[in-house]
Image (spheres, grey):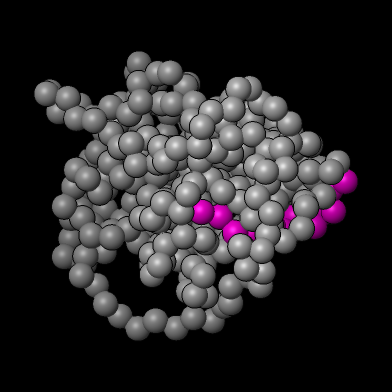
Amino acid sequence: MYRGYRHAVGPLGQDEPVTDHYPQDTLATRADDGTLTLEVTDRWNTPLGKPNGGWVLAAMLRAAMDTTDVGRPAVAAITYFASPEPGTTATLTVTPVKLGRRVQTVDVDLGCDGRPLARMTASFARDHHGPSQELGAAPALPDPATLPDPRELGMPTDGLFGRIEYRMAEVPGWATGEPTGDPTTTLWQRLDGGTAIDWPAVALLTDASPPPVMELGQMKSMTVQLTVHFHRLPEQGGWVASRFSTRHVAEGFHEEDGELWDDQGRLLAQSRQLAILL
């Protein structure tokens, strides 16, 4: 979904008090006729004025988990057709595809007034235990407590900026109008105020930070398709060390690979998305 940012962080409208809106804003409501609805709020808007795609994925994943007898997510793949409009009510349709003994697969469709907005296919694992071997390493980042809060340096608290906290070891080149040419980003992220990270929040954080393609001077990007592989939840919640990179830009499309790690150096999730430059 839309992830564009401006060269300099400046006022985007009236700031609102920072509040923990995450649980209520990703929760669908079931009507008497069984219809699931989701209120589309501007609290998760990017600076382009559209809801963040990570928030859309989190809400759809939560709907699948709340309405179907599945285990924990193993993979979720979402294709975005159009952005929901803030202030509208979207409809969710959850369709079990196969509820097997080891893997349960569910489709979720999001639409508004008969217009399709997104489709997610997710597979879940129930009571599955197997070997684990980690061959990678978390990004080397300073303690987040030692890094400045961008919101105290002028970043507004409306929209997505007020829902997610960021800590970066250095100011990104794109933020000063001097992109570095290296489309790689490492940073700490967490839900505002340290709200506990659940599975939908893991999905959200794979698509909630400034896209690294901005270091190529490309300031506006829209996600077309996003796939997330889920590994585990953080043991203590809180800060998530994140690494995102782009290696290929072709005819206006680019990929973005991501990794999320907890503060103990344990891999939480991997992601890959296809996005289009605007």
Find the residue positioned furthest to the right: 178
Residue under the image location 35 percent in, 21 percent down? 89
The answer to whether 205 appears left or right of 137 in the picture is left
Q: Quadrant of residue 21?
A: top left
In this view, the residue in front, 235 or 112, is 235
Residue under the image location 45 percent in, 37 percent down? 19
The mark tally for this picture is 0
Question: Is residue 165 on the magenta stretch?
Answer: no
Quadrant where the N terminus is found in the figure: top right
Find the residue positioned furthest to the top: 113
In this view, the residue in front, 256 or 232, is 232
Residue under the image location 84 percent in, 43 percent down? 176
What's drawn in magenta, residue-wise?
A: 178-191
Percent across and percent down for residue 86 are 47, 22
In this view, the residue in front, 54 or 168, is 168
Residue under the image location 49 percent in, 68 percent down? 262
Quadrant where the C terminus is found in the figure: top right
The answer to whether residue 226 is seen in the rendering is no
Question: Is residue 189 on the magenta stretch?
Answer: yes
In this view, the residue in front, 154 or 183, is 154
The answer to whether 219 appears left or right of 1 in the picture is right
The answer to whether residue 112 is seen in the rendering is yes
Percent across and percent down for residue 25 are 37, 35
Q: In which quarter of the image is residue 114?
A: top left
Percent across and percent down for residue 154 are 71, 37
